[in-house]
Structures are given as structure tokens and as C-alpha cells.
Image (cartoon, rainbow, N blue to C red):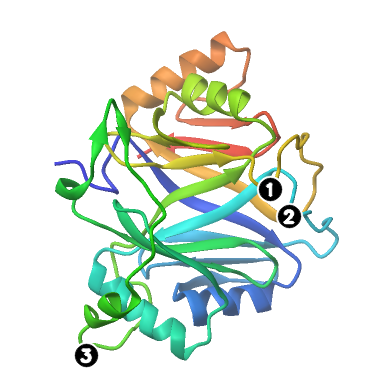
Amino acid sequence: MLTATTAPVTIGRVALTVHDLDRVSDFYQRVVGLHLLTSDAGEVLLGDGETVLLELRRDAEARRRDPREAGLFHTAFLLPTREDLGRWTRHAAAARAPVVGTADHSVSEAIYLTDPEGNGVEIYADRPRSAWRWKGGQVEMPSDPLDIEDLLASAGTRPWAGFPAGSAIGHVHLQVGAIAPAEAFYAGVLGLDITCRYPGGTFYGSGGYHHRLATNIWNSRGATVRSAPSTGLANVEIEADAATLEAVSARMALAGLSDRPGLLSLRDPWGTPITIRAH
């Protein structure tokens, strides 16, 4: 059975460039709940205690990213169970987390916040796949009100102790300048399935999962190629099975894009770095 972390394409780690490494690292540990794995003066690696999920890179000279340019909309951290999300929600209330929104997406329940340098964050848990509704290859993902009280009631009495083993980056949502070239890249070159369309947004899945990546123009319509170095998204790492990696490599060759065996490095039409490696 395919799960959120065993589909043909999954998200490995996300890298962010930041100005204040200590402050941002503290936020992702204290508020979000990631565990510190390694750190030095220029880089911090955070994860679920076993696997790196987030890489923070210090660059005090980097240009501060404009929130309307292409790049990151949010990094979505997937917790293993609804009970875990309930425990995180209780923790977030006590920590006065900077929550900016909540939603019941039918396929999942989600809470949104923003880190100290303006990077979007989603904490979510999936509903069972048997509850997902598909029609014509498209999954229903509304943005309905979230039942916070019921979610808190699911938490039980066990306290939050940070991200449990088995947590993952479920998906990454990107800001782009236009939808058509985004679909040509993420569906055409990377070969992801288009699983849902909203006005101004497209969602891309793999192996029957609702989405691994998403692109929207809600804040960034008409955005041009990113100017580096800047704060914000530095790299999205995609992990793929051998067949997917081979197919993407062939499409990259046809498109005149470079790669090297076992590791594909490319940029989307707005300069966002994407790395694809074998599972």
C-alpha cells in the first residue's frame, strides 16, 4: 500500500536561506517542534529526530525576499496521526504560535503559520485515503472551517514532545509568476500528476497522493526570475523511485537541461532550485 512517504515521488528536505539563524532555528524547534540534529555557525539541520526535514543556511548579506516574488508559499509538515496534530495544536496555543489560518481540506486538516522571516509553514495530518473524494482524476480539496475543538479532543492527555518519528514534509507550495509554464514544468518535465486546480493555483501529486507540490499566483502574478542570493527558499529536494528518476532525466535531456547520474539538479521557470535524488 502506498503511503505519504512511500509514493513514487516524495519530498525529502527543504532548505531555507535566513539572516538570523539563531532566531529562525529557535522558532522551528520551540514553536514548530522540529528536533535539532546538527548545527554550526552557518547551518542548522532539523528533523523528526531521525531524518533531516529542514536545512537552515545563514547568509547575512542575502537580499531580503519580497513576499510577492516567486519562491516559497509554505512548507507543509505532515504529522503521522490526527492525534499528533491535536497535541501540536494544544502546544501551539500554549506557545502563542503565530497562526495565520486553519482549514479542513477534506483530505487533510491543516494549521498555517509564518516563521520570523516570513516563510510560510503548514502543520497538517491526512485523513484516511478512503475518505478522499476523486472525480475525473481530480481530488476534492475545499478550504472549509476547521473544527478546532474536535481536533483538540483527539489529542488525549499525552503531552507534545516534538515531531514524532515518521513525520515528513508532505508537500511544498510554491509561488510562481504564471500557471501555464508552471504546469509545463512540474507536470511536463517532472512528470507529476495534476490532481487539483483552484482559480490561480495547480496541485501536483504522485502515486495517488493528493499533492506533493503546488503552484499559485495569488501573491506573485507576473513574477519574474528570482534574483539570487536572497532569503527564503534555497532548494526543494524531491526523492523519486528509479523509474521516475530515469523518466525525468530523459525529459531533461530532451529539454536541454543538465543532470548527473543519480542526482538531477534543475530550476523551475522562476529560478527556484529543485534537486531530485533516488529514494
- Residue 204: x %, y % from top left: 43, 35
Q: Is residue 37 left or right of residue 79?
A: right
- Residue 153: x %, y % from top left: 23, 82
User: Which residue, given by chain and number where applicable, does mark 2 sit on?
Assistant: 67
User: Which residue, given by chain and number where applicable, does mark 3 sit on?
Assistant: 157
Task: Say if 74 sits above or below 201 in the image.
Answer: below
Which amino acid, by three-letter code, is at mark 2? Pro
- Residue 20: x %, y % from top left: 73, 73
| Sequence-earlier tag: 2 or 3 | 2
| Sequence-earlier tag: 1 or 2 | 2
**Alpha carbon separation for disc pair 2 and 3:** 39 Å
Q: Nearer the viewer, mark 1 or mark 2?
A: 1
User: Which residue, given by chain and number where applicable, does mark 1 sit on?
Assistant: 219
Viewport quadrant of the N terminus: top left
Q: Is residue 51 in view from this perspective? A: no
SS of the residue under disc 2: loop
SS of the residue under disc 3: loop
Q: Are marks 1 and 2 in contact (CB under 8 Å)?
A: yes
Q: Is residue 244 in view from this perspective? A: yes
Query: Which picture quadrant has residue 255?
Result: top right
